[in-house]
Amino acid sequence: MTNLERLIQELCPNGVEYKKLGDVATISRGGNFQKKDFVEQGVPCIHYGQIYTKYGLFVDSTLTFISEEKAKKQKMAVKNDVIMAVTSENIEDVCKSLAWLGDEDVAVSGHSAIIHHTLNPKYLVYYLHTEHFNSQKRKLAHGTKVIEVTPDRLNDVMLPVPPLEVQREIVRVLDSFTLLTAELTARKKQYEYYRNKLLTFRFNEAKSIRLGDACIMKAGKAINTFSISEEKTENYKYECYGGNGVRGYVESPSHQGEYPIIGRQGALCGNVNYAQGEFYATEHAVVVDGTGNALQRYLYHMLTAMNLNQYKSQGAQPGLAVSKLENLQIKLPSIEIQEKIVKVLDNFEAICTDLNIGLPAEIEARQKQYEYYRDLLLTFAETGSTLVTDRAECN
């Protein structure tokens, strides 16, 4: 019996009460400062956009500040409050949250909700990233180009509220998996460092060339959404690439071979994938075919390093035009040097992305445990036995 199971049997043997978020929290809107209000030093502040891009689940210091004068007119979060971004361009990102664990009060921007609550702050944030919460969020969200969940509607969200001792133990179990995340993050940074080092050439080592002269780029073919299956089956077995990678499976392929693929539409446009075999590319993807002087894998690594998202158009639906991509400059060394670079980066990429290479088998097992606990550990029966019945030892 794990420590968590023991606590549940002792403290809530007949199940855990579900409550409305509004019964255990006070939810208010953020303030009205903007990025242009940032200063070098001053009052800590969190802009809603940073919740998606700059911070993890738990934060005790900020990257940005506003003046004391500006802060006087703002809404502030105090230690242990949860800060939620309530608008986004997509349903997946809306309601992304973090717990403020810093000792100072922090100013919170608009398009955010400040959740002042009586729960363990980490417990609440972990819950707000489960599928149980996401299923409720989808019913509360509205909008098309901009997705929003108004703070007052969050009051009706139902969540399990076990005793604080159980909340703390759940947090301890989930926190134990952050070692894996830290290891993978460190390896990713190593990979990016060596990739950029290898792809940076000194004067005369490699000629600059238009991307359009190194390869042929064509947008994929339009396809009806109803022709794409979320799951791979005997009939739907070909990967379908959209703007942000594989979006499902289709009956017939549009391409065969190995190609870098650039996403050209959506918030993550500029994302680079590598397709192999038979696959389908939608109109939201650009298929890159290297000419005789450019290797496909070299182009993949170079395009990944170029941060293509920075070249996207502005607006509610950002995009990348093929004509703009064609005019970007890249470095193209000899085929021999390209082959050497590809060999090094392919090996390093494998180490970074494959849990079976260089990482103990127990870490892979922990990752599978985390995926299970992330969505099920926080789901309890309202009466009777809890649903936490996994026997994997997590102490």
Image: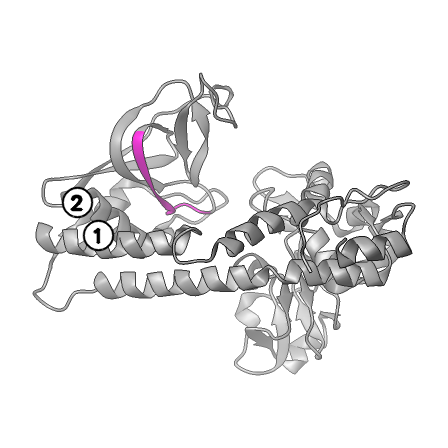
Circle nearer the viewer, 1 or 2 = 1
Q: Which residue is mark 1?
A: 342
Percent x, y of residue 302: 25, 53
Closest to the observer: 340 or 197?
340
Magenta segment, which residues? 268-277
* Amino acid of disc 2: Leu
The residue located at (76%, 52%) in the rendering is 151
In the rendered view, would you say 254 is above or below 116? above
* Amino acid of disc 1: Val
First reached walking from the N terminus: tag 1 or tag 2: 2
Closest to the observer: 13 or 323?
13
Quarter assignment of residue 112: bottom right
Count the marks: how many?
A: 2
- Residue 110 in view (yes/no): no
Percent x, y of residue 16: 87, 48
Majority secondary structure of magenta residues: strand
Left or right of 309 in this view: 7: right
Whether residue 269 appears in magenta in the rendering, the answer is: yes
Label 2 packing within 10 angstroms: few (<14), some (14-19), many (20+): many
The residue located at (74%, 40%) in the rendering is 136
Q: Quadrant of the C terminus?
A: bottom right
Please tell me whether mark 1 sits on a helix, a strand or a loop.
helix
Closest to the observer: 163 or 102?
163
Left or right of 305 in this view: 336: left
Q: Which residue is mark 2?
A: 295
Query: Spatial distance from mark 1 to mark 2, Cα to Cα?
Result: 9 Å
Q: Are marks 1 and 2 in contact (CB under 8 Å)?
A: yes
In the rendered view, would you say 188 is above or below 153? below
Closest to the observer: 197 or 355?
355
Percent x, y of residue 73: 72, 73
Quarter assignment of residue 221: top left
